Image: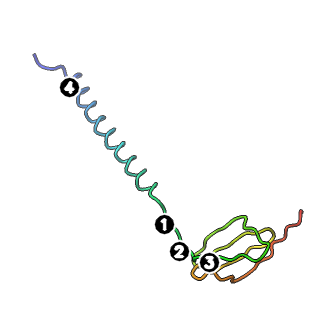
Amino acid sequence: MPEPANLKFLRRLVTVLTVVMIAGVVTVIGLLVIRLQAPSLPDLPESITLPAGVVAEAVTFGGDWIAVVAGDEILIYGAGDGALRQRIAVGGGAE
């Protein structure tokens, strides 16, 4: 007995949707693996010596510099040698 046309269409539709679903899951897993790989860290000096009495509150990295936020100033260090390049005073008063 031949298969009804509606059933044949439904069977092909389910097969196509299954293939699309599998391709979507593989794509999502692939993108997650690519995006969640460990980022490369910047080149850092062996050590950075902060001036006496200064406590680091935040650190950020630039191309060839490292900025250390400490209280009311920002200290800029060289990324290669760790030498202090510049001290920038930041106004800490309330407005």
* In-front residue for pair 43/91: 43
Q: Which mark is residue 43?
A: 2
Task: Place residue 23 in its image quadrant.
Answer: top left
Instruction: Please tell me which residue is depicted at 85% across the width and 67% down the height of the picture.
Output: 92
Percent coordinates x, y for residue 46 in the rendering: 57, 76
Instruction: Please tell me which residue is depicted at 52% across the width and 68% down the height of the picture.
Output: 41
* In-front residue for pair 36/2: 36
The residue that mark 3 highlights is: 65
Callout 3: 10 Å neighbours few (<14), some, many (20+)?
many
Mark toward the start of the polypeptide (1 vs 3): 1
**Residue farthest toward the left in the current orientation of the protein:** 1
The residue that mark 4 highlights is: 8
The residue that mark 1 highlights is: 40
Q: Are marks 2 and 4 in contact (CB under 8 Å)?
A: no
Q: Is residue 72 left or right of residue 75?
A: right
Under mark 1, the amino acid is Ser
SS at badge 3? strand
Q: Which mark is residue 25?
A: none
